[in-house]
Image (cartoon, helix red, strand yellow):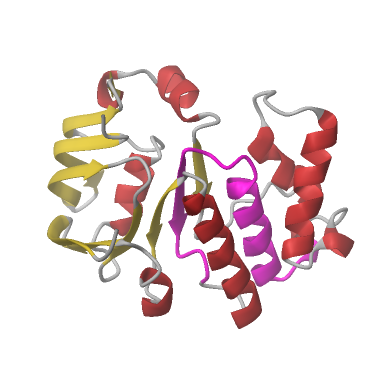
Amino acid sequence: MPLITLINASRTYSMAQGQAQAIDHIDLTLEAGDYMSVLGRSGSGKSTLLNVLAMLDTITAGEHWWRDTLINSASEAQRHQARTGRVGYIFQRCHLIERYTVAENIGIGLSGGAFDAAERQQRIAALLARFGLERHAGHHPAQLSLGQQQCAAICRAAIAAPPLLLADEPTAHLDPHQAAQAMRLLSTLHQAGTTVVLASHDATVAARAVRTLQLDAGRIIADARHRA
């Protein structure tokens, strides 16, 4: 059974100027274990598609299935329950919680009680070390550079090794070393069974994927698998 299926799915927003179609009659099947890059110009619908796949946004027409659950007919509480512990998201703008420390922000990714205190601390420490953030563990986001904030956001999304991890321009603010560490982490998660979907303007980052989805004006214009 596919992990996610979109059938004739559209997402329309109401604006002062009228209706804006962000994604337009998309048919997409995402298999468990896929590693897919989503390409397209700004405004092509990449971020909206990722938000839909993450169950953070809902389609306005068509069907959206998570395994055998019809997500677009579920309540917000049901969608929250469906994505908790199953979906990690690396936001383009980080979305760290300002009142929390870096370590506390990363630990949010372990919510749900699946890990005891010792394992939580071990996982947080390992990810802090991967990105050289150990001495910033007790700092707050405002005390970090934008690149360091993005590293923390990557750690938060990846820490629980969720079944699905989505990344919106995950290396946009990273230096070459940080970017290499981020992509190695995504590859490690994928090899361990996580389904990875990322949107990026960086051709080197996108080339890591085994499948490429090309969007234009909210429609899929190409869907190619490169290697097994």
Q: Residue at x 35, y 40 (%)?
A: 32
Q: Is residue 103 magenta?
A: no
Magenta residues (range)? 143-171
Task: Classify residue 51 as left or right of residue 24.
Answer: right
Q: Position of residue 161 (x, y in %)?
A: 57, 42
Query: Residue furthest toward the bottom?
Result: 176
* Nearest the eye: 6 or 23: 6
Q: Name which residue lies at 62% across and 62% down.
A: 150
Point out the image quarter for the N terminus: top left
Whether 165 is among the magenta residues is yes
Image point (32%, 35%), residue name: 3
Task: Report whether residue 24 is seen.
Answer: yes
Foreground pick, 3 / 140? 3
Whether residue 100 is visible to the viewer of this picture, yes or no, is no
Q: For this rendering, which residue is in front, 182 or 97?
A: 182
- 174 relative to 148 in the view: left or right: left
Quarter where residue 148 is shown: bottom right
Q: Is residue 165 above or below residue 226?
A: above
Percent position of residue 175, x then y: 62, 80
